Structures are given as structure tokens and as C-alpha cells.
Image (tube, rainbow, N blue to C red):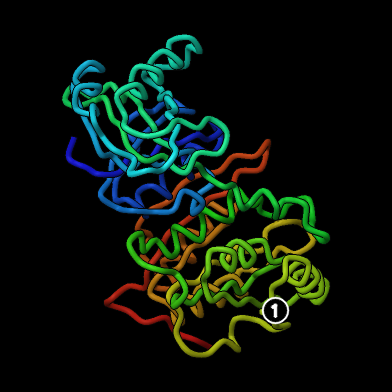
Amino acid sequence: MDTNTLYIFACREEELDLCRLEQRALFGAEMEAAASPGGWLASSCLIEPGRSPFIRHRLLVRRAATSLEELIARAEGWSMEGKTFKIRYVPTAETGFDYDACRGIERRVGAVIRGKAEMRQPEVVLGVTYTGHAEEGWLLGELADNPAIWLAHQNKPQSYSTALSTRVARPLVNIALPFPDGELGDRTLLDPCCGMGTVLIEALSMGVSASGSDMNPLAVQGARVNLAYYGYSDAVKLCDIAHAQGAYDAVIADLPYNLCSKSPREELLAILRHAARLSERVVLVTTEAEELDGLVHEACLLVEDSCRIPKGKLVRRVLLCRPSNNHKPKIS
């Protein structure tokens, strides 16, 4: 297997399309196994598992083999250099989970590792898995679990029923700012329809320099309450995108779509044109279909990738866009 890192994913069926779009942005490829949980993707990119709610485990591959017996032989004598360790078998979609079989694999592999076993608080956690890959499908290496940082952001003080979930907002930031091999601290993000600040909070928790705005004073007030609740400074303004200046690495716009805040065509077109003015990478979230496609074209944006996110009767679309090189948006 031509890789040094294995990522194992888990997502709900309705999240699969979004999960795959995020994978294409971060890794330039999709997981090989369609089933979930347990879908996996091999990559040379080194990404912290907490970047995505869909990454369950990350395995830094140190040993690979075509059979379990060969893997045990290759692992024999591997020294933990005085550190305590434990072995965990990580099932994939190909293998499923059988408790007794998994514990047996852990014991067999752990028996040939040089070091002191510690089940409760080991200094090193080693993972072993089988991907079903024809060549070197058995893998062993350092295992990291997802700390699920976004879970703490689910119960914000201020929210509303149609707001994006944290499990959607966090992938949107990754799609807008993939940069798998670099730090996000010097990346800038603008959310011009920030609502209660869900995207902003996820971006800030990932180290992005994020700011937002909204034309609804109640939304801005709610976003400020939420930001302060999680210890972030005020990064929200009461204004529309027309007042934004400078350039950003990305713009994420969750376009107004419910009955109380749906914008007329001219306002939506203005948002798209200003987004194209401010960044070379624009992520749009909308429930509109044919109408928005025409507006995207009129705003001189090209759709590079997209997905659908169903939630009951509500179906959102995510569009990854960039400004057309042949045209510039006309700002009125």
C-alpha cells in the first residue's frame, strides 16, 4: 500500500455525500470502502483526526503485511523505547467487529512488541487493522482517536431550528480551507451570513482567523453570545458583505433560505458577486436549485464540486466555487 497514514471514517447515511466532498478537498481522493462506519482512506497527508467529525481514527503506519502472521513477524522486536503501550484492533468495513477475534489479534501482536504493556493509561497506543487490500492489507502503527471537539459546540446558548449543525459546519471549513499539510493559523475566512456563528466557532476552534457579519441584529447578538460562551472574542459585525474589504483565503456563505429570512434574487446575486470579489475560494450553502445555478453563473462563479445534505424534508446543497478567470463580477 503506497501510503504512510490510514484514516478510518464513520458517518451517517445522510452525511455520506458531504463526507466524500470533504475527503476530495482534504485528500484529493475518496475512501475506498463505501460502507460506513469503517470506510478507510490511505494518504500521505498528515491531518489531525479532530479536523473532521467523520474521521474516527488515524493510523501512522509503521508495519504492513499481506497476512496477520507476516505482520507479527515484521513487528517482532519493535521496541517502545521504555514507554508503556497497548494494542487496539481497529475494525474496518471489510472486517466488521468480533470481540473475541479482535482481542486475540491484539494479544498476538502485543506479545512480540518490546515494552511494558499498560491497558489503562499507556504512553503509546498502537493500532492494528485489516483493510482487505490485496497487497499489504494488514497494518500496524501509532493510533490516534478523534477528540470530537465539536461535540462541546452542539449546545450553544443561542440557536435556531434551521441552523447548520456542528457536524456540517466543521466539514464546510475543511472544504473551504483544506491545506492538509499546513497550519490554519494564518488562513483567513469570512462568513457574511454568519447567523448564530456556528461556522465561525468551528473555524476558530481549528485555529483559523475567522470573522463574520449578518444583516440581522438578533443573529449578530446571538453570535456574540455564543462566541463569548466558548471564550472567543467578538468577530462579528452588523453589516452586509458589500462593506467587506480586502482579500480572504475563503468565503463560506450559508445563504438565507427560510420563510423569515429568504432574500430576493437581487440580494442573493449581490452576495455571490461580493464573495467572488473577496476570495478565490467560495463555499455556498443553499436550498435553492435551478434558481441559484443561474445566479452562480451570473456572478461569474464556477462550481468545482458539490454535494447534497438531506435533513428530513429539507435538502441543502453545498457548492465549492471559484471566480471565473475570464470574467469579473460586476458590483453595483
The x, y position of residue 27, in whole percent, is 32, 50
Tell me the amino acid under the disc marked 1: Ser
- Give the camera-side residue of 188 and 318: 188
Q: Residue at x 35, y 49 (%)?
A: 24
What secondary structure is found at the residue carrying circle 1?
loop
Q: Dot 1: within a 10 Å radius of its alpha carbon, few (fewer than 14), some, or many (20 or more) residues? A: few
Quarter of the picture containing the N terminus is: top left
Q: Nearer the viewer, residue 239 or 125?
A: 125
> Residue 330: x and y, percent?
44, 84
Residue 303, relative to residue 219: is it above or below? above
As drawn, 304 above or below 330: above
The residue drawn where x is 41% and y is 66% is 297
Return the residue nearer the eye: 267 or 26. 26
Find residue 181 and report its image quarter: bottom left
Residue 8: % across, % down? 41, 36
The spot of residue 317 in percent (x, y) is 53, 50
Query: Is 167 situated above or below 296?
Result: above
Q: Residue at x 33, y 44 (%)?
A: 81
Q: In percent of the image, x 46 and y 46: which residue is there?
A: 307
- In the image, is 153 to the left or to the right of 74? right
Residue position marked by numbered label 1 in the rendering = 233
